[in-house]
Amino acid sequence: MKPATALAIPPQSIQQGSSPTRVYHFARPKSGSRAATVKNLGAPPRADTERQEAQVRDIFMKIDWRGNGTVSKFELVSAMAHDQIVSEFLQPGCNMRMIFEDEATFQSVLAILEHVFGSKEKIKCSDFVARFRPDDVGNSESVDDVHAIFDLIDTNQNGSISKLEFVASVQRNAKVSEFVLPGIDSSEIMTDEWSFDVVDASFEAIAGGKKTVHFQEFSKHFRKQDDDSIRRRRSRTDRAQNKVFIIGPGFGMKLNPRQCEIIENADYELYYCIDVPNPEQHDFNVSAYLGRIKEQMDTFQPDILACASKGGLYAVGLWQMGYWRGPTIIINAHPSLKNLPTGIPVVLCHGSNDEMYPTSRAELERLISTGTPNKCFLYYTANSGQLPSGQFARVGDKHDMESLINHDCLPRLIDACLCPDGPSDYMLRTWRERLTEERLSAERDLGYTPDDLFQISKAKSDGARKRPSITKGINVLFDVMPDSDEFKAVSEVFKSVPKEPPAYMLPPAETWKRTQIVRIERVKNKLQLSGSTKPYFTNVEDSLEEQGIDYEPGVHTVWAFHGASEEAVESIVTNPVAGFQPLASGSRGSTLWGSGVYFGRDAQYVAMGGSFCAPREDGTKQMLMCLLMVGMPCLGDPGHKGVLPFKAKPHRYNSTTDSMSSPEIYIMQHSGGAYPAYLITFKDAA
């Protein structure tokens, strides 16, 4: 068993009594860098066997002295101070008695907390184990891995690499090519002048003017790239503490100024690199300007690189030269972008109606799959299916990507790319920010899991009025008392309107507020809940865990609404197996986002956005409030026929939506993915 290499983690700087302000840099800033000394965090042995993972779990148990399944930062520091085994595991040689007397010791402990907790206040055992898996300890390669690449290049095994060996190995060996020049198509090196120039310049950067490279120089070059990347990455949520380096060409400072405005208004510290030319000129040599960009990046010390359109050529060049291996957000996939480098967080934004770089969704999904799972995210917008009128419910972005300036979308995508938990999880969390705090509070009271529904059913149904179902005589509906907290919570979610204007044409919110709730009934279908909903929930939770994603209530589960006729409602709530039948469902008149059962995030949309709720004889309407197990959603597509794309093989996406920025419609493709928790009877506003 080989010990893992030490992991360099940046200490989180502490500013007391200071309030960071926004800074814009349009010229090269003064020399000097933030930051301090980077300490090595001793990583435990690689967790590639059950025995090794058991060792990590044993350490967790020592830290979790309360035995409640989670540990806080205080508990971890306390355990390091009182248990030498824990201390030696996390930071060999660290004298915890000197933590408040020695700056280096204090900074090393901060580095440990940064690595173990990220942005979380508490972590579970699974989080702790995951932090010490090889894939989660940064981008550094072990000495043995670097040596293996060096040996593949050193074909004559004389202990040094010539330029000829370097070029030949990159061309013939995909593993070598991906390591030294991530994202480049090695097959084109000898036929494409620009590709050859990149390989040639890469060797010169390693060799420093010498004709041959020895292992020490080779290892130092690539380890420095990774150390720089790790040092630059931070997990702060305070935007004012994050530095964004923007490549000017293609970013639309004049043609699309609102794109810049929304970033500037988000309080980041910004640097615009504007002294490089349009890289799409005829016979333009991108590599000639990469050194200039690198100088400015080295001075500014950014947390993230942002580029758009033609600026993507420079981003590809920076990756291939090894000048940047940190978080990157790309707006519009440039045709030169064929693969993503591994180990680097990348957010890619593209619209289906891009008139400059038209790229199919299938190609974009292939491109995003070449990166590291859970580190890469495709923000894609597309046309819905056509309505009976021939119009689209939603329209995909053109090249200027209009959707990025709505709903705080572009800053959220920047934050997502910087999030240590991965951009997909972060974006899902921000979907909740579209809702009011009053609704979120009510949802928390109702719960977000099937077990929560069981508890409500058990605690609330005793003494509540119940009535048989309309036709079958099965007692599944229980009146929720109007004076109960449960009634108030359901009413709050039902009456709530989003903080931002909806994407669909609806009557004014004031009209919706006058809608009268006549009755709320809890659905207590134990067979459906235990036989369909809970097993599916467990499967989704297991799938997320296998992908290294922690299930989060309210993120991977949501409350939403479904309108139907009285007969359909009867069938849904009484079915002993599964209430919803996705294979036989679609939206009214057309399948806008693919086959499945459609749910509205907001009750107002279901009640007023179409003929979803048919009037009953007495003039009232009915709507189901449902708990959805959305898992990891992707954008819907009219061509989806129930089988969704792969997120990371063998795991597919679990559901679809109408938007990856602010979803207002969810589509479930599995019968166990939604449970009809409440039946709400209401009257339209007079």
Image: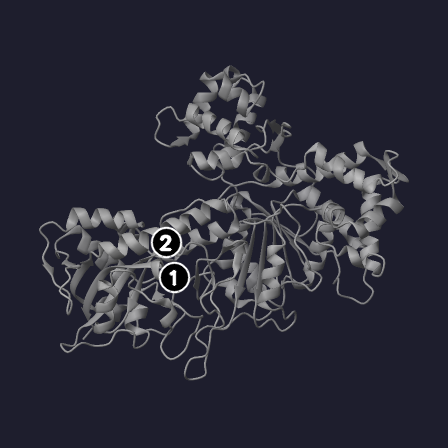
The amino acid sitting under disc 1 is: His
Q: Nearer the viewer, residue 433 or 465?
A: 465
Q: Position of residue 397 (x, y in %)?
A: 54, 69
Farthest residue toward the bottom?
A: 389
Element at label 1: loop
Q: Is 44 left or right of 440, judged from the image as shown?
A: right
- Label number found at residue 205: none
Element at label 2: helix
Callout 2–callout 1 Cβ contact below 8 Å = yes
- Which residue lies under the disc numbered 1? 670
The quadrant of the rendering that contains the N terminus is top right
Q: Is 5 left or right of 11, judged from the image as shown?
A: right
Q: Position of residue 447 (x, y in %)?
A: 28, 49
- Which residue lies under the disc numbered 2? 536
Q: Position of residue 233 (x, y in %)?
A: 59, 41
From this view, report whether residue 600 is shown above or below residue 101: below
From this view, report whether residue 668 is shown above or below residue 87: below
Residue 566 visible to the viewer? yes
Mark 1, Cα crowd under 10 Å, few <14 / some 14-19 / many 20+, is many
Q: Position of residue 626 (x, y in %)?
A: 29, 60
- Residue drawn at (55%, 46%) of the image: 418
The quadrant of the rendering that contains the C terminus is bottom left
Mark 2, Cα crowd under 10 Å, few <14 / some 14-19 / many 20+, is some
The amino acid sitting under disc 2 is: Tyr
- Residue drawn at (43%, 34%) of the image: 125
Residue 265 visible to the viewer? no
Mark pair 2, 1: CA separation: 8 Å
From this view, report whether residue 618 is shown above or below residue 108: below
User: Between disc 2 and disc 1, whose residue precedes?
Assistant: 2
- Residue drawn at (86%, 45%) of the image: 165
Q: Nearer the viewer, residue 366 or 48?
A: 48
Q: Which corner quadrant of the image does residue 363 belong to?
A: bottom right
